[in-house]
Image (spheres, grey):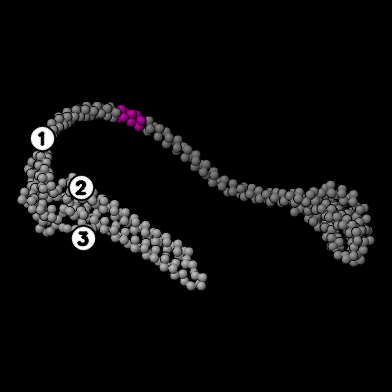
């Protein structure tokens, strides 16, 4: 703030404009168009004057013109408005308008020096910011001068110490350069000597390594040749023995196979076992057929009951229970359930027959290793027992229990097989 802006803020024209607005704000009940025009124009004039005054520069404004306008409006316009606030007649408004019109040229001349309200506010803010910045810069400059003065003595001492250090550094640099030149000469001489020694040692090592490598390679080749020849001889001997053993074993196998085929036509893969397999396969197909038929009957029963439950039983005309329909549905359900039970039993019977026949086929195929090495009398005894127990069993009823070998026969077969296996293992070990 300056003395000019303070004087502008205290000018009486601001109070005059506020007082005029208060007088014009008085409410009047009965008005007409002429009354409203007079009051509207007077409000407009006072608003223009307020805007012009607000846009003036507080530091540079025509104070004489502003005093004249205040004197005229205070004596001519404000008095009429004061009378209007009490009497509320249009004559006071008309007189006030006429008096204000007389000073219209002075007001518009004053408007040429006025700025818009936004520009005036922006200028005022800029001036405040500049004033604050100038004060801050002045304080900063004073503080900086004080700090420079305070540290000037320290800076001089540091300069002197830096000069001393520069001299010492120069001396150290000269000494270091001399030492570095001396070290480089010594290092170059020793490096040359080490390079020559390393080259000579490297050549010697390469020669020794090549000589040793060649000797080891020749030794390895000789050992490999000897080992291959020795292993080849051992392999030929073992392979020849194996061929002889295999030929003997193959001949023995063929002899035992022919012996088995001659055992009263009892055990042969082409007759008995094949018949058991074929019969078991037929029984399996029959069991599958009857099982699917049983499942079909159960599904038909379930569908039939579902349809009857969904549709319900239609009552008779007299409202009673439709017993004929109920009996018919129950009868069909019972028939389907009986058919499902019958087909299920048939499937079980054929499945049992299939299991029995496959057991016979497995036992028949297992006879070769059991009786191959037995004596002729023992083979005849076993043959008679097997004929009694096995032949004709493929047509047996599936509900009967399958025949089994007694404990004595099983023990005899196991002992004979164990002795035969022991003999075969002993022969193989002896031949190896």
Q: Which residue does the numbered mark 1 point to in the structure image?
A: 240
Q: What residue is disc 2 on?
A: 274
Per the model, the C-alpha gap separating discs 3 and 2 is 23 Å
* Front residue (pair 316, 80): 316
Q: Mark 1: which secondary structure? A: helix
Helix, strand or loop for disc 2? helix
Q: Residue 189 magenta-drawn? A: yes
Residue 424 shown left or right of residue 335 in the figure? left
Q: Residues within 10 Å of mark 2 (few under 14, many from 20)?
A: some
Q: Position of residue 264 (x, y in %)?
A: 11, 48
User: Which tag, 1 or 3, sits closer to the chain's start?
Assistant: 1
The reply to whether callout 3 and callout 2 are in contact (CB within 8 Å) is no
First in residue order: circle 2 vs circle 1: 1
Tell me where residue 69 appears, x and y as whole percent.
88, 54
Alpha carbon separation for disc pair 1 and 3: 56 Å
Residue at image location 59% in from the left, 48% down from the top:
147
In depth, the one of 283 and 229 nearer the eye is: 283
Which of the pair 125/342 is nearer the observer?
Answer: 342
Tell me the residue at 93%/55% (across/down). Answer: 98
Q: Are the two marked residues, 2 and 1, in contact with CB atoms closer than 8 angstroms?
A: no
Magenta-span inclusion, residue 94:
no
Image: magenta residue range: 183-192
Residue that mark 3 sits on: 400
Query: Horizontal and vertical percent for residue 97?
Result: 91, 56
Q: Is residue 327 left or right of residue 160?
A: left
Residue for point 21% across, 50% down: 276
Residue 166 higher or lower than 404, as above or below: above
Residues 325 and 134: in front is 325
């Amino acid at each position: 703030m300056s003395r000019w802006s303070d004087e502008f803020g205290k000018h009486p024209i601001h109070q005059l404009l506020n007082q005029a607005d208060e007088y014009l704000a008085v409410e009047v009940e009965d008005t007409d168009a002429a009354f409203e025009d007079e009051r509207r124009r007077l409000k407009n004039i006072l608003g223009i004057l307020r805007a012009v005054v607000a846009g003036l520069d507080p530091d540079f404004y025509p104070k004489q013109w502003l005093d004249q306008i205040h004197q005229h409006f205070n004596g001519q316009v404000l008095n009429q408005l004061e009378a209007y606030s009490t009497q509320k007649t249009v004559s006071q408004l008309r007189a006030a308008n006429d008096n204000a019109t007389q000073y219209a040229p002075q007001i518009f001349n004053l408007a040429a020096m006025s700025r818009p309200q936004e520009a005036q506010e922006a200028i005022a803010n800029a001036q405040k910011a500049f004033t604050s910045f100038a004060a801050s810069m002045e304080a900063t400059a004073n503080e900086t001068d004080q700090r420079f003065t305070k540290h000037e003595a320290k800076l001089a001492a540091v300069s002197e110490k830096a000069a001393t250090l520069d001299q010492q550094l120069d001396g150290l640099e000269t000494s270091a350069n001399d030492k570095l030149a001396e070290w480089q000469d010594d290092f170059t001489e020793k490096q040359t000597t080490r390079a020559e020694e390393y080259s000579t040692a490297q050549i010697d090592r390469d020669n020794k390594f090549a000589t040793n490598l060649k000797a080891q390679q020749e030794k390895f080749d000789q050992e490999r040749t000897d080992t291959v020849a020795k292993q080849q001889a051992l392999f030929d001997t073992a392979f020849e023995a194996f061929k002889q053993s295999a030929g003997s074993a193959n001949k023995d196998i063929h002899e035992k196979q022919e012996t088995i085929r001659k055992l009263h036509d009892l055990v042969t893969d082409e007759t008995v076992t094949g018949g058991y397999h074929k019969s078991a396969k037929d029984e399996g197909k029959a069991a599958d057929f009857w099982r699917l038929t049983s499942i079909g009957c159960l599904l038909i029963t379930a569908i039939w009951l579902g349809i009857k439950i969904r549709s319900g039983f239609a009552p008779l005309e007299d409202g009673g229970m439709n017993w004929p329909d109920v009996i018919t549905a129950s009868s069909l359900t019972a028939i389907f359930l009986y058919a499902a039970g019958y087909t299920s039993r048939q499937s079980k019977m054929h499945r049992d027959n299939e299991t029995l026949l496959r057991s016979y086929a497995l036992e028949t195929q297992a006879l070769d290793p059991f009786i191959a090495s037995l004596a002729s009398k023992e083979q005849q005894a076993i043959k008679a027992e097997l004929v009694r127990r096995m032949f004709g069993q493929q047509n047996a009823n599936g509900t009967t229990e399958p025949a089994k070998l007694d404990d004595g026969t099983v023990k005899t077969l196991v002992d004979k097989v164990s002795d035969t296996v022991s003999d075969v293992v002993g022969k193989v070990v002896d031949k190896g």
